[in-house]
Image (cartoon, helix red, strand yellow):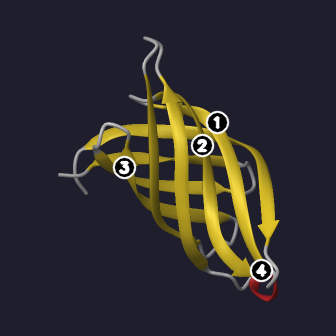
Amino acid sequence: MSEIIGTFELDHICNTFTTDENNMITNHTNWRGTAEGFGAVFGTLTFSPTHLSEMDEKLKGGEVRWTGNGFLEDGTSNAATGTGTWEKDESGHIWRTDTILEFNDGSKARSIGIIELATLKYSGTIYAID
């Protein structure tokens, strides 16, 4: 890993599920909290479409997209979006994420996170990309 540029601690707000005509379900999970260097953060982690028949405990992972905003105390803000993956931990109640983010200023970062289903917390570390 490269240089750590921050950490984040987010709380779950809600989920929104959408379904298409082929029973492909997309899960949009909404989060709020703080991220070191980014201020108050609000964002959505979207899980790629998964067929209804596959949405059970056997599902091991897939693709994700993060889209969010950060609001710093000095009145400045930033936005980011990016794609990556999620993987279910052996325990089943922890999901691990790995995303590459692009910010509105053109910079990029790698975010490695853990979603704890028992507490509905999403936390992790943000790394610089050279």
Label 4 close to label 3 by CB (< 8 Å): no
Tell me the number on the disc at residue 55: 4
Q: Amino acid at mark 1?
A: Arg
Residue 76 position, x and y percent, is: 42, 19
Tell me what residue is drawn at x 55 percent, y 65 percent: 64
Horizontal side of 117 relative to 103 (left or right) equals: right
Q: Quadrant of the N terminus?
A: bottom left
State the residue in front, 123 or 99. 99
Secondary structure beneath dot 4 equals loop
Tell me what residue is drawn at x 70 percent, y 57 percent: 28
| Mark before the other along the chain sequence, 2 or 1 | 1
Secondary structure beneath dot 2 equals strand
Tell me what residue is drawn at x 53 percent, y 53 percent: 66
Q: Counting other residues with Cα less than 10 Å from the Cα at mark 1, is it few (<14), some (14-19), or many (20 or more)?
A: many
| Mark before the other along the chain sequence, 4 or 3 | 4
Query: Which residue corresponds to mark 2?
Result: 43
Query: Which residue corresponds to mark 3?
Result: 102
Q: Amino acid at mark 2?
A: Gly
Tell me the number on the disc at residue 32: 1
State the residue in front, 7 or 91. 7
Q: Counting other residues with Cα less than 10 Å from the Cα at mark 3, is it few (<14), some (14-19), or many (20 or more)?
A: some
Secondary structure beneath dot 1 equals strand
